[in-house]
């Protein structure tokens, strides 16, 4: 009885902005318009003849209601006919930056709210910067309360121009500006009659369009990567590796290589989300059997034969410090990334980012809510990537080994491949980049004989390949 | 009526997120267990736990914290479900409190929940040294649950500190706990009531028949339909009526109201969700015993 229906997307949205910007009212409005607020909830926020006070919908904890502030992220759910939305409503105060970072880490889209009367504030810039830092590539600047400035186009354009000029914001396609009034409903679900000059979509349909674009963006990566999460035994005693496919696609019959052990085998059977499957793609949870009984454990990486990876032990990363106990120089923390872990030492701080003034400053310490660029040394080799190219393989958290608190989160900007991988391949060519080495290895493993010469043509070719594909990979040793 | 997605393929993504969380628990904790409440969310949870490790077996035992006040259909279903999924079932009751006649009539709902649920839960977790207690709670159920992390830390007294939760980024869950402390883990955090029902339909997951409409003897008190079980003290038999009704959530029989409904199958239940005007837990009397009731209970260790 099921008929063919259009695909429904799942979109994770985070909102940032202070209470005064009308953030709660906007969320209340979005929920109200999608009928996600039920009668008993509406009744509890009814304020006399004025109707419901939509800003009260997102109130969560008792202490938050008492203090009139948001402390932690509240998750809200609503849907359109095309999209299921998971909305993470984040706090705006500097003191709760860690909770805002929590919300931003899983977001596909960030809505940055500004009050049209006041324009960009320190808080707006901070929120936009955190979204940028956490790799959120779709940002909606919602200029709110435009009814209070008589829908003044010059004023709205001026705010948009100032926002677009933020030096670190690099989002040509992913930046959307929507003038709205959350209170009155202008440009929230339907276009406002007061701003006929506005060429874009209203906010809710815009979210639908972004979801649709995200859904249609197919991964065309060749080769798969499967970090092993856990190993179980089947009822007949076979070892079954489990994991979530982080990139590419996987089919029964595929040849796989196990890292770091370097053994190889072939996939004989595949399960996707618990069901027998002939194909799994990035984001799917898989279980599989291999033709050979190999040494497998959590933290190992299965890759497509011919797509070898090299581990790293020294990384550079943006670090957001969360814990009230500031960074202790010389202290070893536990680093967790994907399914791997290692001890980690912060060996130096390049600079700290001054969030109030959005500029880099020299610093030798990291305190709660500080963001810095640091060097880390790991106690063992891990398979990592720059965050900009792969969010899963480039993100990590640091855990205090005594208190077990999550003290920081990091996003890898550069990595140095471990010496054995690099020296083996670069004895004669110390200037080769990690990507160049990967290309060479992959060609050699596919049976090509590659001879490096110092002719400029090949060097130019490899350099331009590295420049266009992975600008964030550092130059090896 | 609430707007809902037109197709259910987005459920694959929710399913994958939940499976990844369940595997993470199996891989990183020593004594994990599923807190099984026998309700629809629990049914989805154990179905996902079976899928997560297939073709292997789910490593989690089921713990049922039994107050003695559950509906008879729930006990029957519980034992069948454990057998069907091949999962070990641990039933724990606060026997001392039950023997001394603890009931919502005698002590009020708050004290009764404290003894029969919170105390019993904390006791069984410590008895089996459970370091990860997996539950089926969802963020859309209630406003304090909307704030909860997926891996939610509990101190040595089982308490939740909502103002000082561990930051939780990406899919990196920090499950490190000291002896005596534990984690509550909520793989269904991002599922809504609608998602649960459409998934039950898609996967053909068995649920307790109390969720389907049937003529049942109830006491009608305003909007609330109070089911009549043997345990219920009936002061005025003339208030008894037989009403076509079903349960939207299942708890203890004295504290769970039914709703008028004609929905006798899953399609009808899902259809009905489009027209519902009140939220899911409005029939749970214990949620309304005071302001921020759930938050206060949760801080003390309640589920």
Image: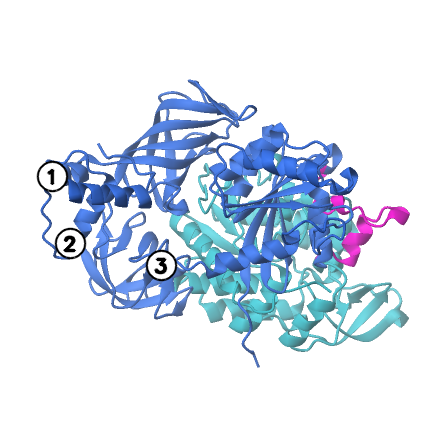
Chain colours: A blue, B cyan
Vertical placement of residue B83 versus A50, above or below: below
Residue at the limit of the structure toward the bottom, as seen here:
A1
Q: Chain of mark 1?
A: A
Question: Magenta segment: does it hold B91?
Answer: no
Q: Are marks 1 and 3 in contact (CB under 8 Å)?
A: no
Tell if the residue under mark 2 belongs to the same chain as the one under mark 1: yes
The answer for which chain carries disc 3 is A
Residue in the foreground of this view, choosing between B223 and B219: B223
Quarter of the image where one finds residue A372: top left
Q: What residue is disc 3 on? A: A220
Quadrant location, the N terminus of chain A:
bottom right
- Position of residue A252 in the picture relative to residue B303 (left or right): left
**Considering only vertical position in the picture, is A453 above or below B237?**
above
As drawn, the label of residue B225 is none
Residues shaded magenta: A36-64
Q: Which residue: 70% across, 34% down?
A: A69
Residue B76: percent from left, percent from top: 59, 71
- Residue receiving disc 2: A445
Write down the residue under mark 1.
A454
The quadrant in which residue A40 appears is bottom right
**Residue A59 falls inside the magenta stretch:** yes
Residue at 48% of width from left, 71% of height from top?
B84
SS under mark 2: helix
Residue A242 shows in this picture: yes
Distance between mark 3 and mark 2 Cα atoms: 21 Å
Q: Is label 1 or label 3 in front?
A: 1
B273 left or right of B57?
right
**Along the polypeptide, which appears first: circle 2 or circle 1?**
2
SS type, badge 3:
loop
């Amino acid at each position: 009885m099921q008929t063919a229906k259009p695909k429904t997307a799942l979109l994770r949205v985070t909102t940032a902005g202070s209470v005064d910007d009308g953030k709660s009212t906007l969320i209340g409005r979005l929920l109200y318009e999608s009928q996600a607020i039920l009668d008993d909830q509406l009744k509890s926020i009814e304020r006399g003849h004025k109707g419901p006070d939509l800003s009260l919908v997102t109130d969560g904890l008792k202490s938050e209601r008492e203090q009139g502030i948001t402390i932690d992220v509240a998750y809200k759910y609503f849907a359109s006919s095309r999209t299921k939305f998971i909305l993470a409503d984040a706090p705006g105060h500097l003191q709760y930056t860690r909770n805002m970072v929590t919300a931003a880490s899983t977001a596909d889209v960030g809505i940055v709210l500004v009050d049209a009367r006041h324009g960009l504030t320190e808080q707006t810039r901070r929120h936009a910067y955190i979204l940028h830092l956490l790799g959120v590539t779709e940002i909606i600047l919602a200029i709110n309360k435009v009814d209070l400035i008589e829908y003044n186009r010059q004023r709205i354009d001026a705010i948009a121009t100032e926002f677009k000029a933020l030096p670190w914001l690099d989002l040509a396609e992913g930046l959307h500006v929507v003038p709205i009034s959350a209170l009155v409903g202008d440009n929230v679900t339907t276009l406002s009659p007061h701003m006929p000059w506005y060429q874009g979509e209203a906010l809710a349909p815009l979210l639908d369009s972004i979801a649709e674009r995200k859904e249609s963006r197919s991964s065309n990566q060749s080769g798969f990567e499967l970090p092993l999460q856990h190993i179980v035994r089947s009822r007949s005693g076979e070892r079954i590796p489990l994991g979530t496919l982080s990139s590419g696609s996987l089919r029964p019959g595929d040849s796989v290589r196990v890292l770091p052990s370097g053994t190889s085998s072939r996939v004989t059977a595949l399960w996707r989300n618990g069901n027998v499957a002939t194909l799994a793609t990035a984001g799917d949870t898989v279980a599989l059997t291999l033709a050979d009984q190999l040494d497998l454990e959590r933290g190992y990486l299965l890759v497509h034969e011919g797509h070898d990876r090299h581990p790293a032990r020294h990384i550079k990363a943006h670090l957001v410090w969360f814990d009230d106990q500031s960074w202790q120089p010389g202290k070893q923390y536990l680093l967790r990334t994907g399914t791997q872990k290692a001890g980690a030492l912060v060996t130096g701080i390049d600079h700290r980012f001054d969030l109030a003034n959005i500029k880099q400053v020299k610093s030798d310490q990291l305190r709660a809510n500080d963001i810095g660029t640091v060097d880390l040394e790991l106690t063992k080799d891990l398979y990592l990537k720059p965050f900009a190219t792969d969010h899963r393989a480039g993100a990590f958290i640091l855990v205090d080994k005594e208190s077990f608190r999550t003290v920081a989160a990091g996003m890898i900007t550069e990595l140095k491949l471990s010496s054995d991988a690099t020296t083996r391949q670069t004895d004669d060519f110390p200037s080769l980049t990690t990507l160049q080495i990967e290309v060479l290895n992959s060609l050699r493993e596919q049976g090509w004989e590659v001879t490096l010469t110092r002719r400029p043509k090949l060097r130019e070719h490899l350099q331009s390949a590295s420049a266009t594909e992975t600008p964030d990979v550092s130059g090896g040793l | 009526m609430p707007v809902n997605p037109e197709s259910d393929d987005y459920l694959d993504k929710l399913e994958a997120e939940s499976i990844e969380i369940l595997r993470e628990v199996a891989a990183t904790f020593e004594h994990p267990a599923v807190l099984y409440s026998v309700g629809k969310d629990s049914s989805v949870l154990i179905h996902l736990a079976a899928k997560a490790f297939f073709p292997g077996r789910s490593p989690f035992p089921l713990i049922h914290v039994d107050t003695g006040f559950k509906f008879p259909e729930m006990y029957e279903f519980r034992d069948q479900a454990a057998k069907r999924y091949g999962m070990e079932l641990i039933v724990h009751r606060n026997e001392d409190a039950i023997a001394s006649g603890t009931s919502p009539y005698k002590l009020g709902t708050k004290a009764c929940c404290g003894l029969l649920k919170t105390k019993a839960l904390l006791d069984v977790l410590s008895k089996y040294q459970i370091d990860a207690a997996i539950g089926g709670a969802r963020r859309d159920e209630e406003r304090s649950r909307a704030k909860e992390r997926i891996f939610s830390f509990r101190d040595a007294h089982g308490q939740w500190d909502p103002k000082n939760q561990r930051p939780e980024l990406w899919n990196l869950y920090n499950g490190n706990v000291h002896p005596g402390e534990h984690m509550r883990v909520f793989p269904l955090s991002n599922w809504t009531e609608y998602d649960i029902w459409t998934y039950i339909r898609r996967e053909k997951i068995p649920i307790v028949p109390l969720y389907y409409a049937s003529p049942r003897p109830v006491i009608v008190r305003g909007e609330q339909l109070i089911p009549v079980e043997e345990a219920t003290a009936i002061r005025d038999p003339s208030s008894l009526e037989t009403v076509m009704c079903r349960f939207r959530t299942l708890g203890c029989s004295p504290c769970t109201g039914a709703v008028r409904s004609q929905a006798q199958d899953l399609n009808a239940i899902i259809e009905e969700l489009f027209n519902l005007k009140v939220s899911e837990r409005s029939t749970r009397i214990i949620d309304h015993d005071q302001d921020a009731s759930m938050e206060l209970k949760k801080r003390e260790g309640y589920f």
